[in-house]
Structure formats: C-alpha cells, structure tokens
Image (cartoon, rainbow, N blue to C red):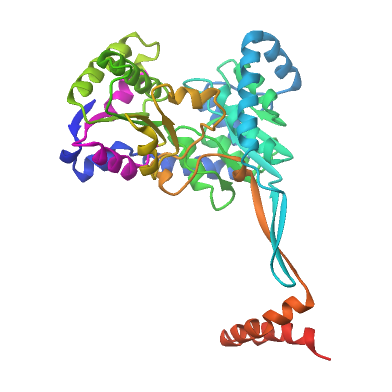
Amino acid sequence: MMIKRISELGDAQMEKLLRSDVKDVTSAVKRILEDVQRNGDSAVAKYTKKFDGVALKNLEVTEEEIRDAEVSVDAKLIKHLERAALNISAFHGEQLNDELWLKEFGPGITLGQKTTPLDKIGAYVPGGLASYPSTALMTIIPAKVAGVPEVIICTPPRPDGTVNPLTLAAADIAGADRIFKVGGAQAIAAMAYGTKSIPKVDKIVGPGNVYVTAAKMLVRNDVEIDFPAGPSEVVILADQPFEKSLTKTATIIASDMVAQMEHDPASVAILVTTSQKLAKAVDVEVKKQMKEAPRKDIIANALKKSAILIADDLKQGIEFVNAIAPEHLELIVPEPMKVLKDIRHSGAIFVGEYSPVAAGDYASGTNHVLPTMRYARVLSGLDTRHFTKRSSVQIITKSGLRDLKDTIIALAEAEGLEAHAESVRKRFEK
C-alpha cells in the first residue's frame, strides 16, 4: 500500500488511484454482447458454462426454488432482511415527488410536471466472489417504491446451478417479478437486447465487476443504465483520535478499509490524514487485520491499489476528496458538519465515528449502489428518480395564450419557422 504526501503525488499517480480496468476488457465484452444479441439464450448458456462452470437447463428461477430457498434460510436472517427492507423502503419513499403537480405562473398559464414510472427494469445482483442479497434489496425496492410494474433481476448461478438462497429470499422480499440465473456481461446483454427467455428491459441498474461495468457502458445506445458502478471505493478523511485514542482510531479506520477491500481485488481504500502518527498506525493495523480476514487473498490484491495519503492540512485533504470524487467518503474529523459543507463530490458521505460504510451497505436505509471511477462528480447514487421519467404539462387558456402570442410569433419568425407563428395566429382569427 502506497504511503505518500498528497503534495508529492504526480498526475499519473493521481489518475491511477481510482483507475478502473474497464478499458482493458472492453474488446472481450463487446464480443460477448454481439454474440448474445445474435444468438440469444444459446449464447447466454454458453458463457454461463464458460464463466460460471454450470450448464443450465432453465435460465429462470422457479417459484418452487424461491420457496425452497426461503425455507432453508435461518428465520432470524429473514427478519433482518425484512428490517433492512423496511428502512430502505422508508428512505426511498421520501424521495418521491408528487405524481402530478400544477402551478399557475400567470393569468391563464398553468404549468406542471407529471412523473411516470418506467415500464420494465432489469437489476443486476452480483455473485461470483460473494453473494449480495443486500444489493437485491437496494436495486428492487426503489423501483417498486417508484411504481415500476415489472422488475427482473439477473444474478450469477453457483456451480451446482442454484442461486444463493439468501439472495433469492431478499429478491422475493423486495418484490422481484422474475429472477434469472445469469451473470456477467452476458446478463447485461440479455437484458439490453432480450432473448427467448429473458425480456428486454427499459433500463439496467446495479453494480458489478469490470466486465459488468464495461457491458453496461457499451449497451447505453440500446438501453438506459443508471451509471458505471464498478469495483468499490472508499476514502476516509481523518484527523482526530476516536474516543481520544490513537490505537482505537487506527483500529476502526483499518477495519473500514479492510471491509472495503474484501469486496473485490480491484477495490480501493484510501486514508487521507493530517497525522503521520495515525498514518503509520493504520498501515500496521491494516496488515494485521488482513492476515486475520477470511478473504485475505482478495484483500492483499486490493491493498496494492490502495493508499495512505498525508495532507498538509484539512483544507488540502478536502480538495483531494473533491478532486477524485470517491464512491464512499467517511468523515472522522473534529467538526464533521462543517467539513460536510465543503464536500462537493462523493457518492455517499458517512459523517462521524459511528457512521461506517457498512451501515449504508446493509440497513440504515440509504442506497449502496453508487457511481465509481470519479463519476460522482456528475452523477448521483441510485434512488427512486432513476426509475421514473418526467413530462412537462401545460394548461393555457385563450387569455393566457393571447398574452404570450406576440412573443411566440416574434421568436418563431426570427427563427424562420413561419408555420409555428401561424399555429398561434390562426387561433385568434375571426
């Protein structure tokens, strides 16, 4: 793990910090997309056998498989899923705008907006290196809260051809209409183009590895997507001891970094601190915790991409955060609310010592599907608005149009669009 002062970072090192390997796999992914577009289910089955090691007879999960999965899951875990689902539903319900609003902006001129849910969306729920029932909740619930009639999900099968029971239970609790045992770029292609078994959707959402992310970026001309949500990232901005203990601070920061790195070998965890003592202590603690972690091989690879950076002061640390726009940002600083006002670019922000990323990952209610690769500079994390579209509404009376007609006619004629002007004039001819 690199340890360096921010002032010593070159442009190449800055670029490398949150660099994705998406470009490296684009050619291979493009071939998969083209194959699925041409050959449908047979291509999907071929790549499922190649990448997941399983020959599937049916791509879709049956109702019986869902019921069996729910019976096999510990009842306490089902209760925890249901509690998380309630929190997620409550938070996303607050994001809903009125279905229709109207306001009189002048005599005879009433304008407004009508919000309508999309007809059909596809959610990608990762599998592979781990199962993510929480992602099923995060991608399906906001869509259902927004009123989407049909939500399908694709998730990779296990070698025995089944899907993790907890993922199936979560998808059922969240309200998925159909579930398919398909992962990787072939799943994105199937949802983008449609096959005999898997329907074409209007929009694809959800996180994934570099292959899934590359596929989503390549199908944007054929289907809408949420945003690139690739390998996970966290930046922790810290310059104070946790409960006045350097050891405690180093322990919790290291645990949050290790938690992020266990997602994927391409995950990135960065500590930005004004304290050299804290930097050294966290470096020691990360290596210690990594050795004890069940997924230490994955963490060891992610560690090579991660970094501890020393800022000259808090202002420089904030500037660095805004420059790289991380997926997740933790603020462990003396006046976090003051610092929060200066943060301009981050997918999700966790304020204070008792706000770990894990809370947002699972149960607080906010969404953990977030833009990566610096896309947080221009894009927002997944919410109900990703599943709706908005139409402007105009209700104009005769007197209202009479008040506007001279302006409309003058501008239409200035643009050389005489028929536009006439469409207004004719309404007032005797």
Q: Residue at x 50, y 27 (%)?
A: 360
Vertical order, 46 against 167 (above or below) = below
Q: Is residue 267 left or right of residue 222?
A: left
Residue 260: % across, % down: 39, 24
Q: Position of residue 154 (x, y in %)?
A: 61, 31
Stretch in magenta: 298-326
> What is the quadrant of the N terminus in the image?
top left
Q: Would you say residue 322 sits in the magenta stretch?
A: yes
Position in image of residue 144 (x %, y %): 69, 36
Q: Is residue 198 visible?
A: no
**Residue 81 lies in quadrant:** top right
Residue positioned 23% across, 32% down in the render: 309
Against 108, is 306 above or below?
Answer: above
Q: Nearer the viewer, residue 274 or 270?
A: 274
Answer with left or right where residue 83 lies relative to residue 49: right
Please state if 356 lies on the left or on the right of 47 as rendered.
left
Q: Is residue 91 shown in magenta?
A: no
Instruction: Answer with the quarter of the image where residue 3 lies.
Output: top left
Overall secondary structure of the magenta section:
helix
Residue ID at (29%, 24%): 303
